[in-house]
Amino acid sequence: NEGDGDYLELEAGLVRVDPLFMQKKAIVEAAGLAASEQRFPIFRDRMPTTLFNYLRLSRVQERTDLDRLSLNSDATLSPINEYEVLNLLLLDLQDRLKQYEGDPNDDRELSMKAQLEPNSLSTEEGLAAALRYRERVILQAAVNA
């Protein structure tokens, strides 16, 4: 299918003023991840488990919960932690969607017009419209998931 390999990156990081920052930093670095500016791919039909686990870890407030969390398996720590993670992720995705102007179908139509009528738009305009449309599809799918 068209766009199956398309993805966007979400950036996440630990909060430096968090009292558990050093312990969390050690956990993520041991897993080969960064404590700041860690990037995760999101696809139209999925997000990596590592992203959710990283976000779960970032929201942990009790030292005892650090021992219960694994970055390698998909396991909910608590309903409150899961609620925070999902809400923050949803807000981030919605904020990114709001950065686009106009209707997504306009970008789709421009992209198709550029393919069907090569001289109607510049190559850059056609590619930009196609890119914006695919980015929106990924973000909207993630919001709806």
Image (cartoon, grey):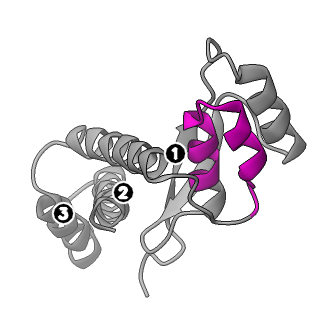
Q: Position of residue 53 (x, y in %)?
A: 63, 52
Please tell me whether the stretch drawn in magenta is mainly helix, strand or loop. helix
Residue in the image at 29% along x and 74% along y: 115
Q: Are marks 2 and 3 in contact (CB under 8 Å)?
A: no
Residue in the image at 42% along x and 70% along y: 44
Q: Secondary structure at mark 3?
A: helix
Marks 2 and 3, how far apart at CA = 15 Å
Question: What amino acid type is highlighted by mark number 2?
Answer: Glu
Marks 1 and 2, how far apart at CA = 12 Å
Question: What amino acid type is highlighted by mark number 3?
Answer: Leu
Report whether 14 appears left or right of 4: right
Q: Secondary structure at mark 1?
A: strand
Q: Mark 1 against mark 2, which lies toward the viewer?
A: 1
State which quadrant residue 111 falls in: bottom left
Q: Mark 2 against mark 3, which lies toward the viewer?
A: 2
Q: Which residue reaches farthest right?
A: 30
Dot 1 or dot 2, earlier in sequence: 1
Report whether 46 appears left or right of 30: left
Marks 1 and 3, how far apart at CA = 27 Å
For disc 3, the marked residue is 110
Dot 2 or dot 3, earlier in sequence: 3
Closer to the camera, 102 or 37? 37
Report whether 27 appears left or right of 62: right
Residue in the image at 18% along x and 63% along y: 110
Closer to the camera, 69 or 26? 69
Dot 1 or dot 3, earlier in sequence: 1
The span picked out in magenta is: 51-72
State which quadrant residue 30 falls in: top right
Q: Is residue 27 above or below residue 105?
A: above
For disc 1, the marked residue is 10
Q: Quadrant for the C terminus, please.
A: bottom left
